[in-house]
Image (spheres, rainbow, N blue to C red):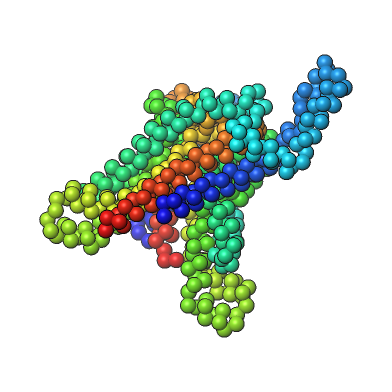
Amino acid sequence: MVVSLLLRQARRILLTVLLGGLLGATLVRLGPGFGVDERELDSRLNADSQQAIRAERARDNNIAAFYFRYITGLVHGDFGFSRSLNRPVSELLAERLPLTLVSLGYGVLGGVSAGLALALLTVWWRAPGADLVPALLSGLCLAAPAAVIALVFLWVGAPSRWAIALVVFPHVYRYAKNQLVATSQSPHVVAAQAKGLSGWRVLWAHVFAPAAPQLAALAGISVSLAFGASIPIEVICDTPGVGQLAWRAALDRDLPLLVTITVLVALMTLVVNGLADLALATWNSTTRSAA
Amino acid sequence: MTGKQKFAMVILGVAVVASLGAAYISRSSYSEQFREAISAPPSARFWLGTDELGRDRFARLLYGTRVSLLLAPAAALLSTVIAGLIGGAAGYLGGRWERIVTAGVDLFLSLPWLFLLLAVRALLPLNTSPVMSVMITFLLLGCLGWAAPARIIRAGTRTQVNSDYLVQAAASGVSRWRLFWRHLLPNLRPILLAQFWISVPVFILSEANLGLLGLGVSEPLPSWGALLRELENYSAVLRNPWMLAPAVLLVIVVSCLQLLLRTEESAPC
């Protein structure tokens, strides 16, 4: 089962690269500035040199050939050249990706931990109005655009990575709370409570453990959310990461750079989703064989 | 409907009516510049003061609310129609078509929303007239936001297709088109409505993010996103806290929509 899931994930990732590459190549091909080379304006170049430049560019007129070269380049780690920053895309990514990944790591971990902890606390502490503060906080974070959350962090001088956590937190909290409440009302939990097991033991072993596989699925969603939030947050907080790079590429209409970033981010999201699915499948098969 | 939801409905109603009656409530237009009152504080004439170009902030807030509150539902309608056609057809036809649509939806959903918006927005002209920028922004939201609703509509259609009444209608010789339009579509209405309402706050927030990044509605036309750009000037916000009015209104309206959504989500489908 795990092997078939692995194969399915690999097929999905391959399909994404191919379709994402096609979409990317088409966008680059249709985008403004394609087929224009400013070297042609260089008066020092003679007619032969200008002809050679035109011939080089003419190769890209065939969209199928262009797509093939684009995909082959991606596979070989050649992500193209940024026209606006006049540097290879791979160099730009190598500079900025680590910073974004660290921010994302902190943000996702912080958001997921806070969401899960508050959801557990809400389910455990059943007093009326116990979920008032977390519900208000999650509602507020859900209703504020990531850019506004980033502005608040900028004003108070807090690290921007925690702004990502605030974007992730409400989604995790609401989903986890619903899952945990549903599990806490199931017959086996009522039976465990009737037998006199302690509140924490019931919560941990009989409510959280059965709901854990469903909660693991949140990892993939959280990464996707965090990547999306990284653009406004990095722009507002002036963090030199991939989100800010994507924004600059959009403003400069540097499509090769923007499309490559988008395809890479999609790939990373798919890999994390695949890992979450794999963890879920392994958990299920282990539980089944134990039973 | 609970008391909280009734309250949310009233607030939303007030916001919509105020934005529609902007011309009557505010004495100035959103683009009129009062050179004698540049960066003026709130007064009886300018309830929220004026910006650095001398424009009435209250008038801009009302007109901006109109742009965001009317066009987000329009974009949501477009995305729900696209999702209904794609997801509904996939669920109804099944087989290869369903597999292709599911793969397409997975691909779309694996692309983080803002990255996708940015990539496609960059393809379109950036220096356009304000009205054109509004159209581009919300058409983009509508055309790219179909994937998540399509997945749910496909699943809902699949459930309906296997239900007894449709099997019986098909066995009675009702044509496929008639089955789809007369029997299936009316029963999908609750799902379509729920997806529409779920999309509205998502699109309002997306427009706000795009606007703050300078890729949304262009000046001088106001929208919530464009109005939020003023907040980047931290020292000015500290001196003039009323500049926070668009952010506060945005959070209140989206919170109200989410409160109402709880009814939509719990509605039987």
Q: Is residue B4 visible in the rendered structure shown here?
A: yes
Image quarter hosting the C terminus of chain B: bottom left
The structure residue drawn at horizontal position 53% and vertical position 49%, both measured from the top left corner, is: A12
- Viewer-nearest residue: A138 or A227: A227
| Picture quadrant where residue B268 is located | bottom left
Q: Which residue lies furthest to the right in this view?
A: A47
| Picture quadrant where residue A155 is located | top left
Q: Residue furthest left?
A: A196
What is the x, y in percent for residue A121?
A: 24, 45
Drawn side of residue A122 relative to residue B70, left or right: left
- Viewer-nearest residue: B129 or A20: A20
Is residue A254 positioned above or below B150 on the image?
A: above
The structure residue drawn at horizontal position 52% and vertical position 81%, both measured from the top left corner, is: B168
What is the x, y in percent for residue A219?
A: 40, 44
Q: Which residue lies furthest to the top in this view?
A: A44
How many numbered marks are there? 0
What is the x, y in percent for residue A168?
A: 40, 41
What is the x, y in percent for residue B46?
A: 52, 34
